[in-house]
Amino acid sequence: MRFNDELSGWRGAALVAATYIYFLIFAQFAFLARLNDLGIAGNALTPVMAAMAAGGIALSLLTSRFTTRFSPATQLRVGFAVCGTAAAMVLAPLGFWAATAVALGVGAGLGVVTVALVTHLRVWTGARHPLLIVGIGTGIGYFVCNIPSLFAASPEVQARFAFVVCLGGVAATLGKPAAFNAPPEERNTQLPFVLILAGFAALVWLDSAAFYIIQHTPSLKAGTWMGNAHLWTNGGIHFLGAIAASLLLSRQRLSIVLCGAVLALGFACMLLLQPSLVLSASLFYPAGVSFYSVALVAYPAFSSNAQTTQQRAQQAGWLYSIAGWIGSALGIGMGQNLGHVPPAFVAIAGASVLAPFVIGAMRSHTREVALAAAVSALAFLCSRHLPAHASSQAQSAVERGRQIYISEGCISCHSQYVRPGTADELMWGPTESMQQVHAEQPPLIGNRRQGPDLAEVGLRRSPLWLKAHMIAPATLSYNSPMPSYAFLFEDSRGSDLVAYLVSRHRASSEQHREEESNWQPSAAVLINSSAEEGAMLYAHSCATCHEQDGVARLRWKTEFHKLPPEQATLRLELREYTAIRIAQIIKFGIPNTDMPGHEYFNDRQITSLTLWLTRRSAQPLPHS
């Protein structure tokens, strides 16, 4: 019996984790990202997501009516099969109607899984520490979704992972369930279900609004969900919060769990009003989410006033229909329409969560009353002292461009940090102090360099070069792996991003210019330089601007600050320069012009190109 309980306990944790992983990584992220890739966005997205909600609400209520007619394992297998099929279908090239059908399947599958799992959760957790099992499963689910490699994966990879998770959910139902017929010790028969339902709806509403706002505000997203450190921290907070919630529920502390959840979520929503405090918000938000997520599973399964399996199923159906699906839709609507969570709503949500406990036990629960007062006071103070909504303030082109830089994921390939005392200083520009770095909200120093460092790109590249490079990278940078961002220039986003990059010229350039003027290739590479290599480098990196039929020259002929010299003119101009000066121009470009440097050329490449140019300029000009 003990072995069977332990086996059932881990199966229960696996089923809870699988449900949360599917909902979080697929229904909330991969599915939406995949629809965007397929061109289903804007107004077309609304009916698709409405279909998902309709499927979730309908099947939550239907499953609650017929849950006693089928075995717990059969219900879960059907639900996970529908969810897995939807995840697999997303990989196909879907049109609008097909996407709507898949969304309906996602909602329907989740409706079956959630109600069936909670109604019969006792047979999957076993009798030993069932609430701790719920906490472990919830914590694992959130932790897995915050693993950086999965969180940042493509929607196709996330959809395949969701499919595998559904297979794991089906596998977890194999074998004989445990017998768990005794009523749980954590029952709260004195609390009216309708009031508990209102409290959960308020929590999901808060969570969904904050989630949408973070997801669609680049500066907030960068300060909470971007970067490995943020994701690992979020995952750890989620897991620890889930364990703490389960331990409190095991001691009949549902009131403390829900109060802690609304306090943490409400505080996070207030902090999100001020972008400089977003890092603090990122600590409270996952804690509040994990607290109520554990209770959302544990309450209908173990702590409600339901007397029979059928009553428990009906309560679960209404809970997930109203609090889960409708509460989520209302929260997303608030995020879309207001762009922030009003402090008054935080106070209302706090009152909704605390109402059943205040009404039922005003005299014996002084701590909960104190928490309610704290939430209300916090909302009032924040409404008086914090700006209504930071993003409502007028933004400059540079500020808008910085948000575009974040939202387009430029930090994934480009750093913004010149390492002091290294070759970075000569290659990418002067360094800046750590005070300047930390003054950025959030800092964008990056942790990888698949492309050049951009800390001082405004010192090294002209606005025209930046624009031309973003529209067609390979025309200016031979074999560049950078994708085209021409679509940004269909509106003002491209110009804003250029303005931001041009502003990346914060440090003093005088000393750096002096270092450039003193630089020359090492004598050791001269014997290895090759005019043939120089000719190839010219064809790849210079001809695009300096030849009459050069791609960049023809495309941007009317927009150059000064049209680059071509053929005969270039050869005449080069005769006036020493070989060292030509090498310096190749490496560093010419300030205040559209002539860029080629910092990534090594000394041998620079001397080879210099050798070819000097030999070519020394040749007689062809007669016209």
Image (spheres, helix red, strand yellow):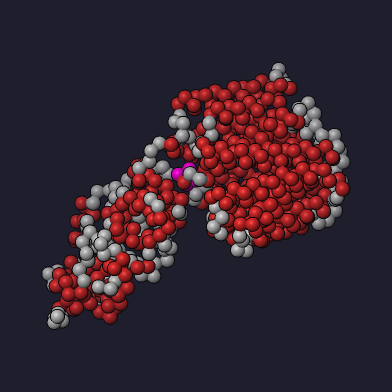
Quadrant of the image for the C terminus? bottom left
| Towards the viewer: 401 or 359 | 401
| Vertical arrangement, residue 183 with respect to residue 116, above or below | above
| Vertical arrangement, residue 483 with respect to residue 57, above or below | below
Which corner quadrant of the image does residue 600 belong to? bottom left
| Towards the viewer: 33 or 506 | 33
Residue 95 % position (x, y): 61, 60
Q: Is residue 447 visible?
A: no
Residue 534 % position (x, y): 27, 76
Left/right of residue 268 with respect to residue 102 in the rendered view: left
Say which residue appears at 56% left-offset and 37% top-offset.
334
The question of residue 581 being in magenta is answered with no
Outermost residue to the left: 576
| Towards the viewer: 36 or 512 | 36
Say which residue appears at 78% left-offset and 55% top-offset.
77
Left/right of residue 459 with respect to residue 203 in the rendered view: left
Residue 196 % position (x, y): 71, 31
Left/right of residue 523 with respect to residue 330 in the rendered view: left
**Region rendered in magenta:** 219-223
The question of residue 221 being in magenta is answered with yes
Say which residue appears at 80% left-offset and 43% top-offset.
64
Q: Is residue 124 visible?
A: yes
Left/right of residue 4 with respect to residue 215 in the rendered view: right
Say which residue appears at 78% left-offset and 34% top-offset.
304
Tell me the chief SS of the magenta region.
helix
Which corner quadrant of the image does residue 292 belong to? top right
